[in-house]
Image (spheres, coloured by chain):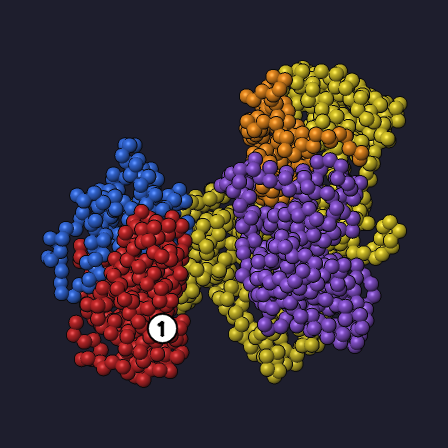
């Protein structure tokens, strides 16, 4: 494993607070995910890939921007693993260096309609940029 | 009964109906909602990562504000409730987080999760009681068939939120029944509507919200109620449009007779 | 305190008269004004000798062990701290509750004669106890004190004025209440010393011991029919101050014997003629028990297990003693 | 290594109380596996760690032991189901008291050793002997005038 | 003064290479009480043993110290040797100079020095010992079995066949337990009733077996070989002696709304009922909660129609006191409650059922007469989904951390039975792992896949939703890395199993220890798997841990053999190294009682004579038959009244002194 990648893996485990070894690979997280079909790497694989330190692939994953933070996987995991926390931690690793920002202020106006609630914009900023 | 009230950003602007109706209903029920002085936006999403500190501070400020006023903190928006409740839980259970936040905030009296965070619905259920509300209803919603849409934020993760049974909640159904309408249960009422993603991928959000609305309508719902501005936006904008989606507080104010229906049930949005 | 005494006399008189009790356990004047002595009263008339004042520190509950072996019911006056000892004696079946009638007496904190002496008091003839103020009439004139300044150590760190056992109370409304200090402060101070300093401290204190056994005799928990130190088959027999045994063993063993049972009544230190702060050994155990196994107050109630007769599977390992901070 | 007055290397005297079912068997296993540990470790067999009276430990120090270790079954594995749990509380309080009285930390120890842990037994004894060697002779509880008592 | 002989063993070169055995023998002669010492090549050999016997006789020894290998090896051997020579066998001490001396040290001088000290310690300990005599107690030749399922029945039959009386106490109205509810059994697919009901009949007909059904254990006292148990016989409302089991009362009972426990609530039963046709005893019970007579006072139909005059509304609970030598816990299991698993809609959709409910649906005597029909509309399901590990292997609060062990196999069975009866029904099984360790088990599972075409999908189900009368099952297919959605007509949940809730109170009553999951713990997980740590209490079946029928029957037989072993003795010889109370010293404070893990200590009022004082005191009494000799009480005793024979305070302190001298 690349040394940087190992460091990323450690950061992700620390920031997420997830003990990936608790996973028994039952797949209930992926079974429960409402946006499964939109993801290239699925919730259960986030757990195993973090365990294996396969972080760079996760950082490239489209799934980072498709996770809805609905916590269904967290709620239903029989072993308390919290896959959504891992996805969040990887996402942060991508957007924390500023170049990783997915949402730029100048792009906002085009996205808006008049009814969009503030909190949606705020959360989009929180989710997609730093 | 007195609460410090945290309205949150959206209720001050786009979701003013949610806020105004809630205040009117509370007044009618004898609940004092004192708006917290100097509140800030909660950030709308709970910072899951344990190394996120700054994004927790505005929630802690609100919690500490209520603590100093010796009031429980009342929330209304699902997102605000979720963020503040979970940050409060961090302050109660995570020693490291508590130490860092307190050393950053430099409060005279360190905050360690003393404030009780109460959602408006919990207030109705636990403080007033749905039976009492039933007695206070002046315009019962006889013959109405109403579905509740819970969304994610109020219920999950249940170990922290402790709001209701996360897989088979009943608080909104009990609320609907208290107003005299028939609650219509359907299995997707606690599944995500995809609201967050509507900025990025509207088609995805559309598919998800339609699945939810279809399920409710198929069972005969004539209205859907919710507590979340994002869900309301998403179901209204990206849903099937077959039935109106309104805030639960609007129905409450209406049936307590404290708010005139403007142009029928759903006023111009 | 005079109010209390009057209440005690009148109730005791009534109870003796109607035969509800056959004997009364209280205090009567000792050789000096400052040493009221535990005593039994059988008749109404004799109750005129019953005294209760700021020097009635001696605890009475232990006398019940023998008293309740006799026929009849004993009326006993218990100060709040004494009720803990009373409960402990009930818990260990040393006293028959049926044979006792407990009047919980109000307490305004007991006075330390050593402190008074140090302040130049001698030849005490009588005393007026006026709430927080104290006027002592001596052969050499009157002396005034703030009561809080001359309390016994055990009273300065009082556990509280609530009676944990009683059949009735004799507590007047206007009784003085005082601010107590942290009872573990001195223990913490010692814990902060180096190992060598602590050794020197204890060697200095314990080497003064003359093995008079006053601590053992006053202790409500030390109520064995036969003490291990008097028992040739215990392996630790030692009746006299023959060697360094006292410094090293006697008090450690005694403290361990009462660990988890000690009610922290403070009698051991109060009665010690050599002024050895023995309560600091007991309080160390209490402090550790509270820290390791959760707050526990012996004598709080008659039921329940004491910390050394129960356990939790997740208890701390003994190694914690060596790992935790301090010198 | 500390040197005593006679100039010989100081070999601390260590008394080890071992429960019959786990730790004594662990010590036997260390022996049958030929694992060395210091010669001055002497084992006393007791049925259970809960048989170890604090008195025995004080007695050992009084008679000149430099360190005392108590070994028992791992918590949860006690042959008598709960004995080691009681022992654990007693020892925690005793050790804390000895520390409070100024007896150097590290002269007392509790270790849970199963019948299968011969290596752990030997390692524990080696480490413990090292710790005690570093502390030197124990004088603070020793009763120099103690001779064979009259009992 | 003792006369002690010291015998130093060379153990070939095992000891002699590092220890100067001659020096050890010589040195020990100067110890107090030692009158003889010698050394020999192999002390445990016949030659060594006869040397010991001769020395005992010749020198009139009162005790011997053998310096040899660990007491764990040969203490028993040398005790026998001593006994043969007429010496009390407990006047034998072993100095372990092999495992704890010669084998761990290389320097002969050091080794010898240490061996001398170890010998000295053994002599010191022996000097303070006294001859010990083991107590004896009677064995009552009757066993109690608690639980009348297959485990209890099998244990009872085995014990009874050996000629001992057995009582079975069963809390429900019939014996048979969970096995009676099953349809077929894996891996042979023979019918459960066909193999169980003959055993039930055997049990009821056996002259040595007494059945106490609809009864519970109320309290227990005593100890191994001599337990006294109070059994509460709950009032049936029917006189068993008069009842002929004709069933007219059941037929005529107007209250038919109670849920049938036996059929898992899938159908109703009358207020007076027999759980199932083959129930034993074949005597009805009145369920007072649903009985109109008991609830309102008006009705009495059953009494009117009963020609045998067996109905007795006034019947009351009866307490029966019986004595036993041994007690077997066979309390069984139940599936966990699924109230925290609403993602599967168990509480919302009638067509989401548990596996045990499915057993009833499959069963010819069940609510659907053996036709597999949906509970909601009584239509045959076309697609059935089985979900494994519902609540098993879960570390979250609502689940169980262990594997329930039986689910993989019964699910394969269910899937196979469905496909056999209804070949056009599609069957899916969501699994995490398929666990099939057992004879012919994996072959059975593979048959389900290969011959019966059951679709096994590796993954868990995330959500079940009811839409248009169908169950939308959303699950993972981890091999395909896909989310699959199956529209099913029925979903069967393999709910985790847990010990029966009555086990906990029984465990407390019998001081039988339990693990965190409330399974009874065995005395040793490998070597004593059917004994509880408390003497005389044995474990049979699922109350000890998840197991299938073959394992249960095997364990039941093993428990029976242990019981037979105990009951075959006329007397029990105890371990004499037990606690003893010195009454004049005892304070009667109860502290020892609180720490005794066996309940061996009681308090009695005894006349105590102490230095001329005669008084009646509350003193502690140790029951030597129950005491196991751990010594917890001896340390907790404040006055030193409690001591442990063979390991007295003085003995251990003498050892300390000898070592430290």
Camera-nearest residue between E8 and C122: C122
**Who's the residue at 73% across and 31% down the image?**
D146
Quarter holding the C terminus of chain E is top right
**Who's the residue at 33% across and 68% down the image?**
B4
The chain ID associated with circle 1 is B
Camera-nearest residue between E413 and B53: B53
Q: Mark 1 highlights which residue?
A: B2
Chain A, chosen colour in render = blue
As drawn, E401 above or below D20: below
The location of residue A86, given as percent across then percent down, is 31, 46
Quarter holding the N terminus of chain E is top right
Chain letter for yellow? E
Chain B, chosen colour in render = red
Camera-nearest residue between D90 and E157: D90
**Who's the residue at 81% across and 45% down the image?**
E136
* Quarter where residue E46 is shown: top right
**Who's the residue at 75% across and 39% down the image?**
C241
The location of residue C231, given as percent across then percent down, is 79, 43
Chain letter for orange? D
């Amino acid at each position: 494993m690349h040394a940087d990648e190992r460091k990323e893996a450690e950061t992700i485990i620390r920031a997420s607070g997830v003990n990936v070894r608790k996973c028994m690979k039952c797949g209930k997280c992926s079974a429960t995910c409402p946006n499964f079909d939109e993801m290239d790497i699925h919730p259960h694989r986030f757990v195993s890939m973090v365990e294996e330190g396969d972080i760079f692939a996760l950082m490239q994953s489209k799934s980072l921007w498709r996770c809805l933070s609905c916590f269904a996987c967290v709620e239903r995991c029989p072993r308390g693993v919290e896959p959504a926390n891992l996805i969040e931690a990887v996402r942060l690793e991508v957007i924390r260096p500023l170049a990783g920002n997915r949402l730029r202020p100048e792009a906002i106006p085009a996205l808006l309609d008049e009814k969009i609630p503030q909190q949606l914009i705020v959360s989009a900023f929180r989710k997609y940029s730093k | 009964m007195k609460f410090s009230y945290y309205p949150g950003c959206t209720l001050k602007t786009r979701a003013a109906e949610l806020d105004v109706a809630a205040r009117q209903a509370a007044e009618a029920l004898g609940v004092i909602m004192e708006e917290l002085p100097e509140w800030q936006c909660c950030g709308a999403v709970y910072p899951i990562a344990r190394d996120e500190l700054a994004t927790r501070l505005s929630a802690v400020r609100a919690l500490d504000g209520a603590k100093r006023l010796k009031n429980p903190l009342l929330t209304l928006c699902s997102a605000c409730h979720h963020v503040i409740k979970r940050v409060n839980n961090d302050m109660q259970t995570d020693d490291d987080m508590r130490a860092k936040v307190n050393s950053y905030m430099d409060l005279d009296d360190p905050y360690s999760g003393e404030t009780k965070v109460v959602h408006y619905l919990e207030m109705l259920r636990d403080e007033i009681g749905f039976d009492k509300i039933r007695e206070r209803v002046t315009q019962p919603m006889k013959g109405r068939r109403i579905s509740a849409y819970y969304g994610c934020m109020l219920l999950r993760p249940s170990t922290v939120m402790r709001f209701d049974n996360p897989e088979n909640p009943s608080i909104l159904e009990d609320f609907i029944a208290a107003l005299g309408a028939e609650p219509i249960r359907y299995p997707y009422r606690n599944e995500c509507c995809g609201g967050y993603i509507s900025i990025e991928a509207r088609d995805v959000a559309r598919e998800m919200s339609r699945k939810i609305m279809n399920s409710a309508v198929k069972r005969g719902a004539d209205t859907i109620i919710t507590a979340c501005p994002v869900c309301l936006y998403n179901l209204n904008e990206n849903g099937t449009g077959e039935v109106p989606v309104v805030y639960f507080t609007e129905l409450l104010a209406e049936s307590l007779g404290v708010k005139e229906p403007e142009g029928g049930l759903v006023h111009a949005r | 305190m005079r109010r209390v005494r009057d209440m005690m006399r009148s109730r005791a008189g009534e109870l003796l008269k109607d035969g509800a009790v056959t004997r009364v356990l209280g205090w009567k004047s000792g050789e000096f004004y400052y040493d009221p002595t535990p005593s039994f009263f059988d008749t109404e008339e004799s109750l005129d000798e019953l005294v209760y004042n700021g020097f009635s520190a001696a605890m009475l509950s232990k006398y019940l062990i023998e008293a309740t072996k006799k026929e009849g019911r004993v009326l006993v006056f218990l100060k709040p701290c004494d009720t803990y000892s009373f409960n402990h004696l009930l818990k260990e079946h040393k006293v028959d509750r049926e044979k006792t009638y407990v009047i919980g007496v109000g307490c305004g904190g007991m006075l330390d004669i050593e402190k008074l002496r140090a302040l130049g008091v001698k030849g005490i003839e009588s005393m007026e106890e006026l709430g927080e103020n104290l006027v002592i009439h001596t052969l050499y004139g009157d002396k005034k004190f703030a009561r809080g300044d001359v309390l016994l150590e055990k009273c300065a760190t009082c556990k509280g004025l609530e009676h944990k056992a009683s059949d009735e109370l004799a507590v007047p409304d206007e009784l003085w209440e005082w601010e107590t200090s942290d009872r573990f402060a001195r223990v913490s101070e010692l814990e902060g010393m180096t190992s060598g300093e602590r050794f020197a401290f204890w060697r200095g204190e314990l080497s003064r011991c003359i093995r008079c056994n006053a601590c053992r005799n006053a202790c409500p928990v030390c109520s064995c029919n036969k003490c291990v130190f008097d028992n040739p088959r215990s392996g630790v027999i030692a009746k006299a101050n023959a060697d360094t045994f006292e410094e090293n063993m006697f008090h450690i063993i005694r403290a361990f014997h009462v660990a988890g049972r000690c009610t922290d009544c403070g009698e051991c230190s109060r009665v010690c003629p050599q002024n050895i702060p023995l309560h600091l050994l007991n309080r160390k155990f209490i402090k550790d028990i509270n820290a390791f196994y959760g707050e526990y107050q012996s004598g709080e109630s008659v039921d329940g297990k004491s910390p050394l007769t129960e356990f939790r599977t997740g208890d701390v390992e003994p190694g914690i003693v060596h790992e935790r901070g301090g010198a | 290594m500390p040197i005593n007055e006679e100039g010989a290397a100081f070999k601390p005297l260590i008394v080890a109380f071992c429960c019959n079912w786990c730790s004594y068997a662990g010590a036997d296993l260390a022996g049958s596996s030929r694992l060395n540990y210091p010669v001055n470790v002497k084992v006393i067999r007791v049925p259970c760690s809960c048989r170890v009276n604090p008195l025995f430990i004080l007695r050992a120090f009084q008679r000149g032991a430099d360190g005392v270790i108590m070994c028992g079954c791992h918590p949860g594995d006690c042959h008598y189901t709960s004995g080691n749990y009681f022992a654990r509380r007693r020892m925690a309080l005793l050790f804390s008291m000895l520390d409070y009285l100024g007896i150097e930390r590290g002269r007392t120890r509790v270790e849970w050793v199963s019948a299968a842990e011969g290596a752990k037994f030997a390692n524990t004894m080696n480490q413990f002997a090292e710790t005690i060697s570093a502390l030197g002779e124990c004088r603070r509880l020793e009763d120099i005038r103690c001779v064979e008592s009259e009992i | 003064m003792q006369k002690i002989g010291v015998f130093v063993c060379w153990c070939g070169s095992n000891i002699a290479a590092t220890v100067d055995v001659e020096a050890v023998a010589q040195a020990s002669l100067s110890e107090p009480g030692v009158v003889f010492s010698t050394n020999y090549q192999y002390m445990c050999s016949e030659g060594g043993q006869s040397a010991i016997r001769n020395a005992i006789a010749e020198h009139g020894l009162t005790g011997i110290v053998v310096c040899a290998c660990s007491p764990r090896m040969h203490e028993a051997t040398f005790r026998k040797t001593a006994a043969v020579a007429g010496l009390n066998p407990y006047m034998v001490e072993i100095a372990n100079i092999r495992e704890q001396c010669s084998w761990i040290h290389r320097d002969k001088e050091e080794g010898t020095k240490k061996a001398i000290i170890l010998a000295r310690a053994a002599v010191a300990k022996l000097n303070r010992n006294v001859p010990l005599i083991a107590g004896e107690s009677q064995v009552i030749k009757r066993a109690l079995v608690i639980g009348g399922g297959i485990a209890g029945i099998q244990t009872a039959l085995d014990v009874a066949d050996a000629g001992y009386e057995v009582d079975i106490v069963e809390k429900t109205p019939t014996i048979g337990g969970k096995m009676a509810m099953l349809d077929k059994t894996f891996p042979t697919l023979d019918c459960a009733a066909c193999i169980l009901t003959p055993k039930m009949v055997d049990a009821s007909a056996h002259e040595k077996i007494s059945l106490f059904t609809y009864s519970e254990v109320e309290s227990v006292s005593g100890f191994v070989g001599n337990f006294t148990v109070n059994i509460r016989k709950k009032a049936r409302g029917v006189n068993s002696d008069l009842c002929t089991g004709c069933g007219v009362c059941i037929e005529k009972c107007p209250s038919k709304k109670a849920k049938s426990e036996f059929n898992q609530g899938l159908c109703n039963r009358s207020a007076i009922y027999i759980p199932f046709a083959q129930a034993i005893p074949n005597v009805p019970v009145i369920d007072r909660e649903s009985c109109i007579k008991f609830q309102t006072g008006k009705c009495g139909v059953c009494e009117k129609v009963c020609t045998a005059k067996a109905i007795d509304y006034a019947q009351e609970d009866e307490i029966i006191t019986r004595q036993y030598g041994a007690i077997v816990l066979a309390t069984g299991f139940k599936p966990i409650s699924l109230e925290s698993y609403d993602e599967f809609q168990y509480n919302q959709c009638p067509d989401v059922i548990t596996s045990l409910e499915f057993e009833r649906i499959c069963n010819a005597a069940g609510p659907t007469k053996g036709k597999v029909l949906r509970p909601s509309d009584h239509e045959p399901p076309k697609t059935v989904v089985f979900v494994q590990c519902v609540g098993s292997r879960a570390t979250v609060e609502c689940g169980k951390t262990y594997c329930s062990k039986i689910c993989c196999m019964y699910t394969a069975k269910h899937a196979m039975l469905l496909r056999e009866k209804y070949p056009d029904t599609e069957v899916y099984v969501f699994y995490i792992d398929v666990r099939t360790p057992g004879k012919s088990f994996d072959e059975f599972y593979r048959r389900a896949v290969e011959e019966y075409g059951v679709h096994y999908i590796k993954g868990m189900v995330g959500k079940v939703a009811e839409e248009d009368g169908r169950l939308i099952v959303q699950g993972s297919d981890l091999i395909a890395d896909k989310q699959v959605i199956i529209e099913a007509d029925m979903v069967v949940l393999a709910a985790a199993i847990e010990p029966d809730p009555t086990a906990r109170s029984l465990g407390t009553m019998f001081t039988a220890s339990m693990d965190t999951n409330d399974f009874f713990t065995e005395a040793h997980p490998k070597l004593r798997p059917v004994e509880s740590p408390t003497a005389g209490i044995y474990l049979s079946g699922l109350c000890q841990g998840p197991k299938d029928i073959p394992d249960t029957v095997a364990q039941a037989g093993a428990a029976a053999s242990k019981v037979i072993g105990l009951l075959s003795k006329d007397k029990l010889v105890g371990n004499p190294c037990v606690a003893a109370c010195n009454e004049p010293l005892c304070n009667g404070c109860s502290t020892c009682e609180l720490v005794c893990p066996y309940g061996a200590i009681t308090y009695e009022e005894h006349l105590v004579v102490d230095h001329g004082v005669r008084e009646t005191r509350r003193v502690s009494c140790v029951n030597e038959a129950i005491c196991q000799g751990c010594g917890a009480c001896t340390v907790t005793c404040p006055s030193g009244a409690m001591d442990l024979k063979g390991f007295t305070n003085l003995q251990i302190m003498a050892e300390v002194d000898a070592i430290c001298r």
